[in-house]
Amino acid sequence: MIQFLLNNEMIQLTKFVPNMSILDWLRTNMGKVGSKEGCATGDCGACTVVIGDLINGQWHYKSINGCLMLLGNLHGKHLLTVEALTTKPNPSLEQLHPVQRAMVECHGSQCGFCTPGFIMSLFALYMSHKSYPGREAVIQALGGNLCRCTGYEPILKAAEKCFSYPDNDQSNIAHKDHRFSQQVAVLTTNLEKALADNEIPTVSLDGENQQFYLPQSLKQLCELKANNPQAQFVAGATDLSVEFSQLINQKQQLISVRYCSELMVFEESEQGLEIGAALPYSEFIDKFCHIYPEAHELFERLGSLQVRNAGSLGGSIANASPIGDPAPLLIALDAQLKLQSIRGERLIPIDEFFLDYRKAQLAEDEVIVSIHVPKRQETFKLSCHKISKRIEDDISAVCLVLSYQLENEKMQQVKCAMGGMAATPALAKNVAAALNGQAFNLDTLQTAASKIAEDFQPLSDVRASSTYRLQVTKNLFDRIWYQSAGQIQSLSVNLQSTSAIQTRINHASL
Ligand SMILES: Cc1cc2nc3c(=O)[nH]c(=O)nc-3n(C[C@H](O)[C@H](O)[C@H](O)COP(=O)(O)OP(=O)(O)OC[C@H]3O[C@@H](n4cnc5c(N)ncnc54)[C@H](O)[C@@H]3O)c2cc1C
Ligand code: FES
Ligand code: FES
């Protein structure tokens, strides 16, 4: 049985189809049709719902795509849908939730199809801030929500206005939202008790050999996988659910890696960083970027906030996609993967992990437990670049991450890791050889960049042509130089003026 809270209700489920998304369940099983389905691939945000994680007795809320997250991964969580925000029929303006009231007052909705998604993204922002966090935070929060008819400026104004209404109750469970406080406090206590008594929750659909497993230790997880070799792991399901909805590639048995504490760690030690393979991006980006601020833009541009609230490094690496953004970064950082099965544990350098297009050195019974990143040296330099058609919520055409040690003004141990240039994320070895032992200057960078065609003969596809990929990579070496010389800023510094939302605002105002 899985147990979770849905708005002000306790839900206990013993039967459901393993690959059922939260959105399908809400709309088809619960008759809650406020959350909309636009794309079913995480691209439009119409399905956005808010999920609470219970940490030390306190709920922490975040937005996610209901079309991607799987129902089984709701175990122990609090799901909030747009229906919960205003429960009174025909409410007055003052009876609406502050984010809804602000959207009405600022004229933030026209056809209204996107509106529940915007409301829920704004609601998550509202729940996690005591006052207006500024335009850049709002743009980040709304980066995964598309609106085709209103235009974004009224929505951005609503995001500011919702924080301006009087709020008399700051002491409640949902930070500042008294609508959930009393009932949810009682339900939370009940849920905590139920979870404490729980064994491994295994949910099955009668007689059809369908299971959704939620192992809570690495040992249980490896045993389950060994006993059910056909079962597939699932973390945030931001990749897997797209397979379910687009390729109609259904799975009979899924093993969630999200309830296994060994896969959810983030530890910093003298040896470096240990990042749990199942930890959602948004739970480690800030800590990671405290050590590697150069990677901030890469993470900030990985999908949308909803995707980063769900997706994980383990999911990205296991997918072995040539265009996943984390792999080039981790290759340039000399990361190692910890893999585990009932046969034991092994460590493998990430640059040896990828074998061919979406093929990796991961045995059928193995799980990725964590990613080890060696401790940063004082002489270590890093430069990360993503080329995509849109700034936010877009997959890379090319990703380049350059790392080196700067010793006696010479570049040493150079690594130039690239995505989008071959069947796997890979090192540009000729480029690196041309940089090794050289001074860091524009001439050296341009000479090395000219070797790129010796390393890669990229494909032409919908994202970019082969010629474009080679040329833009050469240009990136110029950017590396001008950025280091302080002559151009990184995109994230300029986010407010260059973001996709801002671009759409500019278009809308033409
Ligand atoms: C709208 C949208 C935008 C996106 N934008 C980007 C982007 O800009 N950049 C980018 O890099 N990616 C992007 N992605 C892809 C995706 O979000 C990432 O690849 C993410 O990291 C996948 O993690 P997950 O936890 O959701 O994986 P899941 O979907 O849960 O799993 C993916 C695969 O990995 C396997 N798996 C999961 N965890 C483990 C484990 N611990 N051990 C072994 N196997 C495992 C699963 O069986 C499955 O085959 C986007 C996706 C969407 C839907
Ligand atoms: S329906 Fe479009 S993101 Fe979920
Ligand atoms: S109001 Fe119509 S799509 Fe946003």
Image (cartoon, helix red, strand yellow):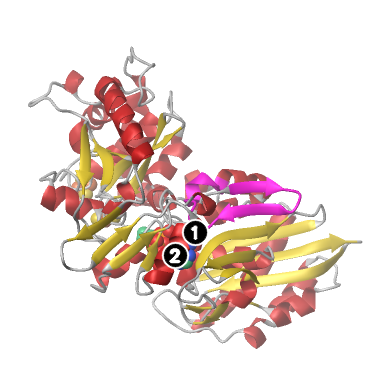
Question: Which residue sits at x=24%, y=51%?
Answer: 22
| Residue topped by disc 2 | 223
Image mark for residue 219: 1
Image mark for residue 112: none
Question: Which residue sits at x=60%, y=72%?
Answer: 418
**Residue placed furthest toward the top:** 168
Using the rendered image of the protein, determine whether residue 50 is visible from the camera's viewpoint: yes
* Image quarter for ligand 1: bottom left
Residue 12 vs residue 328: left or right?
left
Badge 1 density bin: few <14, some 14–19, many ≥20, Cα 10 Å: some
Residue 290 vs residue 393: left or right?
right
Depth check: give the residue in front, 319 or 155: 319
Q: Residue 306: where, in percent of width, then height? A: 38, 49
Q: Amino acid at mark 1?
A: Lys
Q: Would you place residue 105 above or below residue 399 in this image?
A: above
Magenta span contains residue 454: no
Q: Amino acid at mark 2?
A: Glu
Q: Residue 354: where, in percent of width, then height? A: 56, 77
Numbered range of the magenta stretch:
266-285
Q: Gap between marks 1 and 2, in whole Å?
A: 6 Å
Is disc 2 placed on a helix, strand or loop?
helix
Residue 174 vs residue 8: left or right?
right
Residue 103 vs residue 400: left or right?
left
Depth check: give the residue in front, 44 or 20: 20
Is disc 1 placed on a helix, strand or loop?
helix
Q: Residue 185: where, in percent of width, then height? A: 31, 24
Badge 2 density bin: few <14, some 14–19, many ≥20, Cα 10 Å: some
Dots 1 and 2: beta carbons under 8 Å?
A: yes
